[in-house]
Amino acid sequence: MEFPRDDDRYRRKCRHYRQFLFEALRSSGGAILSGEALGNSFEPPTVVQLRRDLESSGFREFHIVLSIRDPADFYLSRTQSILKVPLHCGPLVADPVSFRYRFRRIAENWEQVFPGRVIVRCYPRGTRHDVVEDFSELLRNRLGIKLPRASIRLNTTVSAEAMVVLQNYRQSVGTDEGGRRIPGLRRLVTFLMRSGRHFPQTKPTLNATVAELIRANHREDAEFISARYGVDLGLARTDGGSPLAARSSWRVEDIVEAFDPAIVRRLHDEFHRLRFRLHLLDIAQRGYRAIPSSLRPVRLDAWLRARFKG
């Protein structure tokens, strides 16, 4: 369950988590704090407080690792995240003209509090070398720390067609009475992520013109990162085609290179058939539970409990 950030229960959960976290840190000789977009969530006052908290727990040596993505890749990844996460209230597809991936500001915020301790890495783009492996390699080579190999890699990327389905579903269903949740969205995301196993779909690729515009808007910051940290983010100029036409709002269809409308329709239809079957199953389940347990067939009852976990 999610709570508004000014909710007392939310603040209480934060206090409890903070207590749990720092109790664990105080009892350890070293720690790795990692999270997607962790650096982007911390402004200088928060970074200062974090350093004070860590030092009060006995930590003295720090290394801040920032993995910076190609801004065009980050834009596409962020769009997918917004489509799948129910708490976003703004546009589902950000305007690429005004979009900013503020990696320079992030680096400066952490450098200000941890001078000389910031390590910048270019986020791996190859399928054979991911960010976890890159981080493990850095720890091994720089600090002599060997992390256990992660056996599971969860790729949560959905197809270009699935992005269109998510967009259309969210716009047609809207939010619940509290204005926060999109009914059925989690089930739809699960269905779309599994659908790739059953029939081929189009890999999401950003339109070349959109990608070039986003990279162009970030080249100055990339030059700063290169000059300060010696890291080339690879934002070389490419032929992005014709100029980008202005739009009052943006849709998935405007930013992806290609998608198959027939697959969009198939995903839409199969999900609604699934919802209908699950709805009938839910009705049957509620009806069966209304039958007194003494009147239920014993073998059938045992099978149903095992099949549907109670």
Image: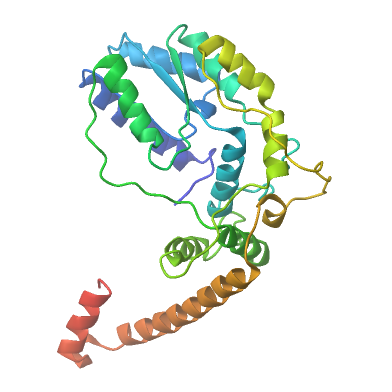
Residue 60 appears left or right of 96: left
Residue 219 location, x and y as percent? 67, 24
Residue 127 occupies which quadrant of the picture? top left
Residue 117 location, x and y as percent? 42, 10
Residue 304 appears left or right of 12: left
Quarter of the figure with the C terminus: bottom left
Residue 118 occupies which quadrant of the picture? top left
Residue 285 location, x and y as percent? 35, 82
Residue at position x 64%, y 20% from top?
A: 221
Question: How many labels sit on residues?
Answer: 0
Residue at position x 83%, y 46% from top?
A: 245
Q: Is residue 99 visible?
A: no
Residue occupying the far left of the picture: 299
Q: In this view, does 66 lie above or below 259?
A: above
Q: Can residue 158 be seen in this view?
A: yes
Residue at position x 47%, y 77% from top?
A: 274
Colour pattern = rainbow
Residue 179 location, x and y as percent? 62, 55
Residue 148 or residue 27, whichever sits in front? 148
Q: Is residue 216 above or below residue 76?
A: above
Residue 304 or residue 61, whichever sits in front? 61
Residue 169 appears left or right of 117: right
Q: In this view, does 279 lie above or below 191?
A: below
Residue at position x 28%, y 74% from top?
A: 308
Residue 168 occupies which quadrant of the picture? bottom right
Residue 209 or residue 139, whichever sits in front? 209
